[in-house]
Image (cartoon, coloured by chain):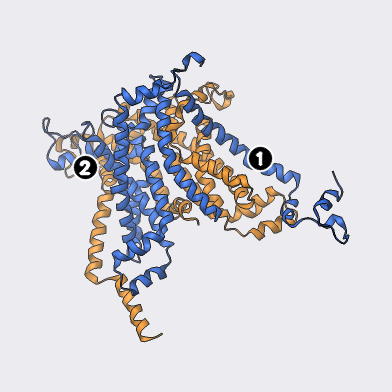
Chain colours: A blue, B orange
Amino acid sequence: MSGPAPSNASAPPGPSLSGADIVPAHRRRYSVLTRRDKTMMALMVGIPTLLCLFFIWFPTVVSFGLSFTNWQGYTALTGKNIIGLKNYEYLFTSYPFFWPAVWHNILWLLTFVFIATPIGIFLAVLLDREMRGTRIYQSAFFIPVVLSLAVIGFIWQLQYTSQGFINSVLGRTGQEDVIDWLGNPSLNLWAVLVAASWRHVGYVMVLYLAGLKSVDPTLREAAAIDGANARQTFFRVVFPVMKPINIVIVVVTVIESLRAFDIVYIINQGKNGLELLSVLITNNSIGEARLLGFGSAIAVVLLVISLVPIVIFLTRTMREEAA
Amino acid sequence: MTAASAAAATHVRRRRRGPRWRRVLLHVFLISLALLWLFPILWTLYTALRPFGETAQDGYVSLPRSLSFDNFVSAWNQAQMWRFFLNTFVVALPGVTLTLFVSSMLGFVFSRFSFRANLLLLMMFTAGNLLPPQVIIVPLYQMYLLLPLPKPLSDYGLMYDSYFGIILIHIVFQTGFCTFVLSNYMKTISRELTEAALVDGASIWMIYRKVVLPLTRPALAAMATLLFVFIYNDFFWALMLMKSGDKRPITSALNNLQGAFFTNYNQLAAAAFLVALPTIIVYLVLSKQFVRGLTLGSTKG
């Protein structure tokens, strides 16, 4: 197709200029893109999109489908494998580890929200000033963040074992009075949460410090001139204008508590008091136990819970993009 | 400047610095807390430096009679740790490079051309990145057992138990966050610049490669640092999607090495310290890049 005809059609009728030059304003930007450019862009976006769809969103949908079956993966999946809601029924009513795991995830979240995150914010506020050594302090609190939770599990085992630091200091290293921090099912979750919080505090601190740096300093000065003290300035002035970063921190905190896996797995494979939804999924469906349908049902529960923070984050971003 | 505002200004300055005793108190507090924070790591190092016989006799909380690197050497040799570190680099180097390549292209298109679909696609990538990996592991594991992969890339002709498979899932999972950060960064590059290049007849590829990518270098450096640490620290993917223990990268390998090779806590401490060291060094050397990478996503530039 060539010739001026198509562009003339949309041009307003009027004195005849050389028709070929008239291109509607809103089209001009794209008219410089050649066909090759368009193909290039389609490839740049298309290939990653297909990979993302195939390796993330397709399994997500399949997980949902599998949760209605009793498939074990040895034979082909047929109509006979469909068992309706039975997996969910068993999960909610009879599976002994489900509710403890849910409760452990909730405790994990509560500890992060009410202890680790506030400490991180507190440290950020303390360190957000011109002060000698602030970089060194920041590094000290941040170093745990660069460690994997598997290594953190190792490091804290040295604190918690029978002859480890904590029992030695408490004088509880004897055979009968030793405190089994990681083996006792009513203690071990708390022991692990201390280690996990050790990491989370630094993460929140760094995110919050970045947020605090972006707060307009005149706001603080105005508050000080009005006679506000440090506490009032933070809670009444700084905290409210930090809303975007606060949302990021809420999302990060929730996601991290739902994702928790490595540290309990390295300590005892998530058993005996350390059950979490994430570990139940893998323990039931990968390795010796091959209850793929049942494991998928747990995955769907975790998915539904995870969608809450994800949707919050996306709507916030979407609104910002639109603005 | 009037007298009143000058007074207010000094008032502000004084308030911010606070009296001397308060500053001293703050430092005492921060120093103690920082030491408390570093204690588990320092303790690991201390335990690793002490011979097992000595700690068995005196207990772990005791003054040292001798210190040596013997535990490091024996942990390193017995478990053949160099192999697992090598495996890590086989995964991390292509993982980081390809993730940056893919997400910089995506970020480029998303930030330069606002098609209606772009926002939607960006959402899809970001949401995928936020999903707990355990949600998709059951079908993904089956897919990896079914998907064929030609021989040189895998030992069994499958995605399962292959480096290719591990690298791929890292790329797919990390692209979301990385694209989000890079496209935000690229939005700060002047639109006129790329539009001028376009009018001058430069192709899309040229603009991406010669105009936008060089200007994005600081963000790319930050993301490279962060991605390396993320992939180095991955425990889950290689544990689930690889069968052969000796092919696993170091972090995932810890799971098997734990009981088999590290027979006492002194050796375990040495191993833990060796595994922690690379990321700590990366952080200490590139702390600016690292922190920048983490915060770029949350504060928009």
Residue displayed at 14% across by 34% down: A178
Residue displayed at 50% across by 27% down: A62
User: Where A72 falls versus A277 (above or below)?
Assistant: above
User: Where B91 falls versus B18 (above or below)?
Assistant: above
User: Where B220 falls versus B69 (above or below)?
Assistant: below
Residue A23 falls left or right of residue B258 = right
User: Where B54 falls versus B292 (above or below)?
Assistant: above
Kindly identify the amino acid type of the residue bearing the numbered disc 2.
Ser
Name the image quarter holding residue B97: top right
User: Which structural element holds mark 2?
Assistant: loop
User: Which structural element holds mark 1?
Assistant: helix
Q: Nearer the viewer, residue A66 or B207?
A: A66
Q: Determine the CA span between mark 2 and mark 1.
A: 62 Å
Instruction: Tell me the number on the disc at residue A309.
Output: none
Q: Nearer the viewer, residue A300 or B30?
A: A300
Kindly identify the amino acid type of the residue bearing the numbered disc 1.
Leu
Residue displayed at 48% across by 13% down: A80
Q: Please determine if labels 2 and 1 lie on a single subunit.
A: no
**Mark 2, other Cα within 10 Å: few <14 / some 14–19 / many ≥20:** few
Are dots 2 and 1 in contact, CB under 8 Å? no
State the quadrant of the N terminus of chain B: bottom left
Q: Chain of mark 2?
A: B
Q: Nearer the viewer, residue B61 or A48?
A: A48
- Residue under label 1, please give it: A43
- Residue under label 2, please give it: B66
Give how far across and how far down residue A158 sits, in percent.
25, 38
Give how far across and how far down residue A227 sits, in percent.
30, 73
